């Protein structure tokens, strides 16, 4: 180990919500990831699982039923819309209703891991390049 590296802390007790409704805590022992990358991988995996569950809800089906892409406002069939995280999971975003929007595949692929402000700047740069 280098001079600034610390050994991983294992089996630290953590508080975990049993459910959002009752807000009861229970203590659970689980390994604390040894590095930030492990933590981020866990975060992304956990949030993707939550997104998969949200995809089957009436809320999401209603969202895509309009067929409107959040980013370009284009009209698409609901099957052609993808689930996008406005704040990407890789940048600390969560899989909750405030952060998930329907996006066409083209916008979703172009946006990648951009934050909303970065996406807006990107779109402005495209518009100004078209105007020149």
Image (spheres, rainbow, N blue to C red):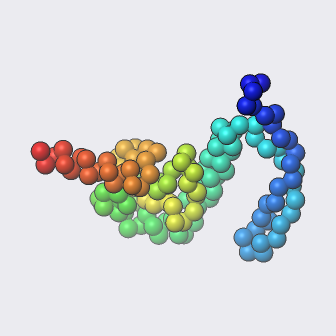
Report the number of numbered marks. Answer: 0
Q: Residue at x 35, y 46 (%)?
A: 106
| Image coords of residue 24 (percent x, y) | 82, 71
Figure quadrant of residue 36: top right
Q: Nearer the viewer, residue 82 or 94?
A: 94
Q: Nearer the viewer, residue 87 or 58?
A: 87
Q: Residue at x 65, y 37 (%)?
A: 37
| Image coords of residue 64 (percent x, y) | 43, 63
| Image coords of residue 116 (percent x, y) | 41, 55
Q: Nearer the viewer, residue 80 or 87?
A: 87
Please, is residue 114 above or below residue 37 in the view? below
Figure quadrant of residue 38: top right
Q: Would residue 12 be seen by someone viewing this image from the given angle?
A: yes
Residue 77 falls left or right of residue 21: left
In which quadrant is the N terminus drawn? top right
Residue 91 falls left or right of residue 63: right
């Amino acid at each position: 180990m280098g001079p600034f590296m610390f050994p991983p802390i294992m089996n630290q007790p953590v508080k975990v919500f049993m459910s959002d409704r009752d807000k009861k805590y229970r203590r659970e022992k689980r390994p604390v990831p040894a590095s930030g990358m492990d933590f981020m991988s866990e975060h992304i995996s956990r949030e993707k699982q939550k997104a998969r569950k949200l995809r089957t809800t009436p809320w999401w089906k209603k969202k895509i039923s309009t067929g409107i892409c959040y980013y370009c406002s284009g009209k698409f069939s609901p099957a052609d819309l993808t689930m996008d995280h406005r704040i990407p999971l890789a940048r600390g975003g969560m899989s909750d209703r405030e952060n998930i929007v329907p996006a066409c595949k083209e916008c979703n692929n172009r946006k990648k891991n951009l934050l909303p402000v970065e996406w807006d700047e990107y779109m402005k740069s495209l518009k100004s390049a078209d105007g020149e």
